[in-house]
Amino acid sequence: MSSIISITQDQLAALSQRRHEPEWLRSLRLSHWQRFEQLPEPSTHDEEWRRNDLSQFDLASLTLATPEAMAVQRALPPEAQAAGVRFADLAEMVRTAPEALRPWLMSDGLKTTDRKWVALHSALWTHGTFLYVPPHVTVAVPLRMTCHLTQGGVAVFPHTCIVADRGSQVMLFETTTAATDRRSVVNTATELFIQEEAQVAYVNLQAWDGQVVSLTTQRAHIARGGQCTTLSVYLGGQTTKAYVETLLTGEGAVANLLGLHMGEGHQQVDLHTLQDHHAPRTTSDQVYKAVLGGSARSLYTGLIHIRKPAQKSNAYQLNKNLLLTNTAKADSIPKLEIEADDVRCTHGAAVGHIDAETEFYLMSRGLSRQEAGRLIIHGFFEQVLGRLQQPPPQGAADPPRNMAGTVQEEILEAIDRKIAAAL
């Protein structure tokens, strides 16, 4: 038994059997559990963990959550359902259509891992969503999913698997919230498979309450000519440790990794990003911005890896931090690992306070200090939010209305609530 969580391999096998899971899934869980037990526990001597309080991630005193601990709502338009789009509960898919899941669920990036927490998630996932878009199907409006944690003192392992088949287009907007009275740990993973010429936009608005500690892994695989835009918005939770990784495996693949974080009090977000170019003529563009008040902290580590076959690739990485107080802190560690000799890679990072002259100018026009700060923060985040777009339907005669506009508006409303508390 691991000291991290009070469960054994036999108990895991019994849990899988009670859920009537197929043998291949039970074997998959047990192999991940064995990998979890083999890997060393995180230590503050590790570069990856030395800035974290490991006691926050302890699960031994928590209860493994039941499906009732998290309320999940999904909305699938009738026309999308008629076109063959699947947007369903993962456990239900295991019961009703397990063979539709088998080619995708933890089939690649999460199949083997060197991270103990990812192996634990892969063994114990309890909640989840499966989204499949058939070849050449365009979902014209953003799909929505809300996840609300209703119990405290639990360890929760939600899993999302998104598959966009060849030439398809879809946007998924996921919101996560909580109303708990005790510390909980939410260990999530999201797999995205973007097949040839497909386009996916995935937005996660994280608004946990202050009792939640979050561990997040997001990994996208982009095939030839595919395009993927991810936007991660971290507003809630006590501590968030997130890994956002994109593997560009097909020629001409494009990835946009976008992120926003607004912290107050003693909140901490520790973000690790990976732009991993495996194929030629691939493009990745990563922009992550944080606004920090109180004694909040942002930790950012980003790696661009250009492998030898990925000639003529283009990668960009930017991390900017705006501090509202003298006690807030931001650390930025950009990295490059380039094996090819015909590529373009650039990166940048900056940390600073609100410009006093800009604030004075806005206040001289009649705005309060809080209103001026709100406008400055909106402008700071615009570089990220302005790039979120819903792909237009294929063959559309006229430019369609930007369906991502409503998503942007909801994110700004959530940010405004955070600004009111921070300023």
Image (spheres, rainbow, N blue to C red):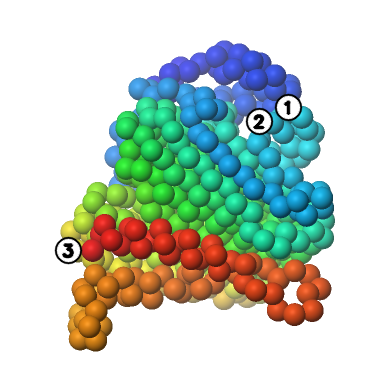
Q: Secondary structure at mark 3?
A: loop
Q: On the picture, is 297 further left or further right than 245? A: left
Going from N to C along the chain, the mark reached first, 1 or 3, is 1
Does 1 appear above or below 174?
Answer: above
Estimate the x, y position of residue 132 in percent, counting from the top left: 73, 48
Q: Nearer the viewer, residue 186 or 3?
A: 186
C-alpha distance separating marks 2 and 1 = 7 Å
* Residue marked by disc 3: 326
The quadrant of the picture occupied by the C terminus is bottom left
Q: On the picture, is 136 further left or further right than 282? A: right
What kind of residue is marked 2?
Answer: Ala
Q: Residue furthest left?
A: 326
**Badge number at residue 10:** none
What kind of residue is marked 3?
Answer: Asn
Estimate the x, y position of residue 336 in percent, counting from the top left: 48, 64
Of the two numbered discs 1 and 3 in the rendering, the one whose residue sits closer to the viewer = 1
Does 230 appear above or below 118?
Answer: below
Question: Residue sitting at 76 percent across and 40 percent down?
Answer: 103
C-alpha distance separating marks 1 and 3 = 54 Å
* C-beta proximity under 8 Å, tags 2 and 1: yes
Estimate the x, y position of residue 75 in percent, counting from the top left: 64, 48
What kind of residue is marked 1?
Answer: Arg
C-alpha distance separating marks 3 and 2 = 47 Å
Of the two numbered discs 3 and 2 in the rendering, the one whose residue sits closer to the viewer = 2
* Residue marked by disc 1: 95
Does 144 appear above or below 402?
Answer: above
Q: On the picture, is 185 further left or further right than 361? A: right
* Residue marked by disc 2: 91
Q: Secondary structure at mark 2?
A: helix
The quadrant in which residue 288 appears is bottom left
Q: Secondary structure at mark 1?
A: helix
Question: Residue sitting at 51 percent across and 66 percent down?
Answer: 408
